[in-house]
Image (cartoon, rainbow, N blue to C red):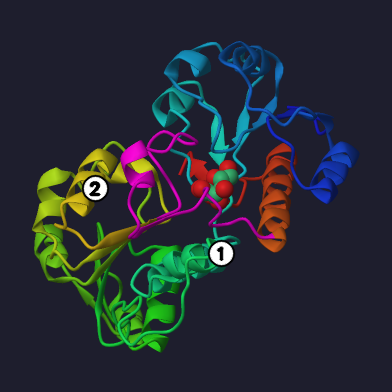
Amino acid sequence: ISNRPKVIVTRKLPDDVETRMAELFNVTLNLKDEPFTKEEMVAAVKIADVLVPTVTDTLDADVLAEAGEQLKLIANFGAGVDHIDLKTAREKNITVTNTPGVLTEDTADLAMALLLSVPRRIFEGEKILRGGEWTGWTPTFLMGHRIQGKRLGIVGMGRIGQSIARRAKAFNISVHYHNRSRLPAKVEAELEATYWDDLDQMLSRMDFVSINCPLTAETHHLLNRDRLKKMQPHAIIINTARGEIIDEEALADLIEVGRLAGAGLDVFEEEPTINPKLLELDNVVLLPHMGSATIEARKAMGEKVLINIRAYTDGHRPPDRVLPL
Ligand code: 8YV
């Protein structure tokens, strides 16, 4: 790979990031800012030395099979790499990097916003007021559920999960978690987090559940209908990770019949299409995948992409390697 590689960026990135990229690399930007079609993606992997995709790009086995010898690096703009077929990338010796760390706090903030909004019925209140339906205060109007003293179960205790745990602690919520591996005792103690080896048992005891694991073959529909049924009827589920981790249809059904109290969702199974059942439910807050959408995070994500490409072209191991480990 030359030190002025051909870099193809699939979506419009913040201006400063694009300017810097153009200074450093032979870059093709996507000025339309619409996701590439499959044909455009195949054409891109055939000629790019470095591809900079986002969550809206599908780099499945079919597409990657078409990648030319010259494609050496996929420098993803985003932390989650579930849209990239890592097996094929590995077979083709393509290095894959992501942008962890710089979006942690913002995503945790958004998860927390959802965690506060659903039990306290914030968006219902807003809707009523803006709809001109507020006729005045009454003692029983829009009663929600208290946040403090409740139990939060975090599924996936990586960076974002841990940041949510810190915030939850400040709200006097007791923190529980399930993770592939238990955290070091020191971290667990600092977070005052209780580890549950058994996900089902944890789910059955929580008031709030936050999904914060990556989407992989193992976590696809991790919260399936059976598991969701194990949760308490007053429980609320928050998802800022990936829609496919929850069986969305089952979630909507269970909320509809009162087997679950509500949900705060920033991610969906078929983005940007929203399951119409969810749209009918008042006790569900729906956001358009904006967990890391701050100016600061987006710029920092762009910088990470640049650093990863630069490291690679300078012959070093890029810092945020997903592949090879
Ligand atoms: C981005 C995300 O919006 O990083 C992730 O995994 O879901 C978000 O930060 C998106 O992925 C950017 O590609």
SS of the residue under disc 1: helix
Q: Is residue 210 magenta?
A: no
Name the N-terminal-most of marks 2 and 1: 1
Viewer-side residue, 250 vs 93: 250
Q: Quadrant of the C terminus?
A: top left
Q: Look at mark 1 in the image and give the residue it sits on.
A: 130
Viewer-side residue, 114 vs 172: 114
Given the image, on which type of amino acid does mark 1 rest?
Answer: Arg
Give how far across and how far down residue 292 sits, in percent: 58, 57
Give how far across and how far down residue 115 sits, in percent: 39, 70
Where residue 261 sits, quadrant-wise, is bottom left
Give how far across and how far down residue 260 sits, in percent: 19, 59
Look at 83% across and 46% down and name the residue there: 15
Asked if residue 78 shows in the view, the reply is no
Q: Is residue 290 magenta?
A: yes
Q: Which mark is residue 251?
A: 2
